[in-house]
Amino acid sequence: MAGKRNKTIITCAVTGAIHTPTMSDALPYTYDAIAEQAIEAAEAGASILHLHARNNETGAPSVDPADFAPFLPRIKQATDAVINISTGGSLTLSIQDRIRPAATFSAEMCSMNMGSMNFSFHPLAKRYDNWKFDWERDYVANSDGNIFRNTFKDIREAAETLAPHNIKFEHECYDVGHLYNLKFCMDTGLFKAPIFIQFVMGILGGIGADIDNLVFMKKTADKLFGDDYRWSILAAGNAQIPMATTASQMGGNVRVGLEDSLFIARGELARSNAEQVAKIRRIVEELGCDVATPEEAREILDLKGGDRVAF
């Protein structure tokens, strides 16, 4: 119900499948580090934790449920935060592989990418000479040849497979066309209101992170979904905090975390996910908004509850 709630939900994306361990020592990739940073982010004010997994030895992106199992129960026992499991995983994997963790653990939320795109981060390969793991350089450099596949068939398969779990989807829309894809899927009965949309901005291959584009995305979503949606913004790199600040003043929710940006200020690496959460919380509250608790987030997004997950 855009513009009609007075609580700002903070999501923290703790570790992603994009950034590599080389780029920042703060980026968690071991089971222990992911759990510790997720718990700290929740304590700092994140009501939703968006989680990827990594191989504990190599740091490589993983969709193996065995790589989620060591940290999910720890986070659940230590916090009341909503767990949102990624279905993005790796750009080269099938949708069946990518949705397996969400299905295995029956999380309250999971991401759902709403269109195929040239998702690339290959320019990062030129910024580093030394790499911690053997897989990193090629993984980053070769991303210019990958298409992040999310066809209508893929979206339907994911939605139908996960429907029995009553999982709320975080519909990640990287461009305006993805909003129209989502509208089509709603019209055909795949998703029901209220939906939760994440405007993803500043990723190479998607829409740029600037205020004009945010206003356009918001106006388009209003036209397509009326009062039947909630929304948030994810802005990559140095646009993270400025765009989140703007979105919070437009009635939106916000996402921060080391998956989206390794920095706390221009040229200054963040020391942790919690540092980013604390910064955006301070800004949001000083500008007159209240930050939602996990229970308030569950009510706003109509979630099934933390007692109905399988971890």
Image (cartoon, rainbow, N blue to C red):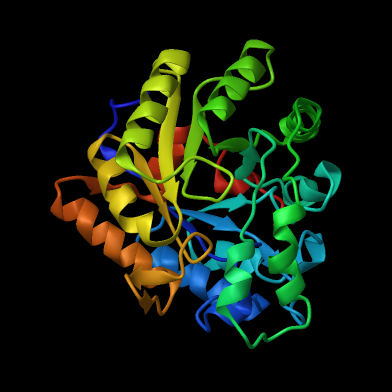
Q: Residue at x 66, y 76 (%)?
A: 31
Q: Is residue 65 above or below residue 234?
A: below
Q: Residue at x 66, y 33 (%)?
A: 115
Q: Answer with left or right where residue 201 lies relative to residue 77.
A: left
Q: Answer with left or right where residue 278 lies relative to residue 203.
A: left
Q: Is residue 147 above or below residue 154?
A: below
Q: Is residue 309 above or below residue 131?
A: above
- Residue 297 horizontal/vertical position (percent): 41, 42
Q: Is residue 220 above or below residue 307?
A: above
Res. 139 in view = yes
How many numbered marks appear?
0
11 or 118: nearer the eye? 118
Task: Give the position of the N terminus as an image quadrant.
Answer: top left
Q: Residue furthest top?
A: 187
The quadrant in which residue 232 appears is top left
Q: Residue at x 64, y 75 (%)?
A: 29
- Residue 246 horizontal/vertical position (percent): 26, 44
- Residue 221 horizontal/vertical position (percent): 44, 22
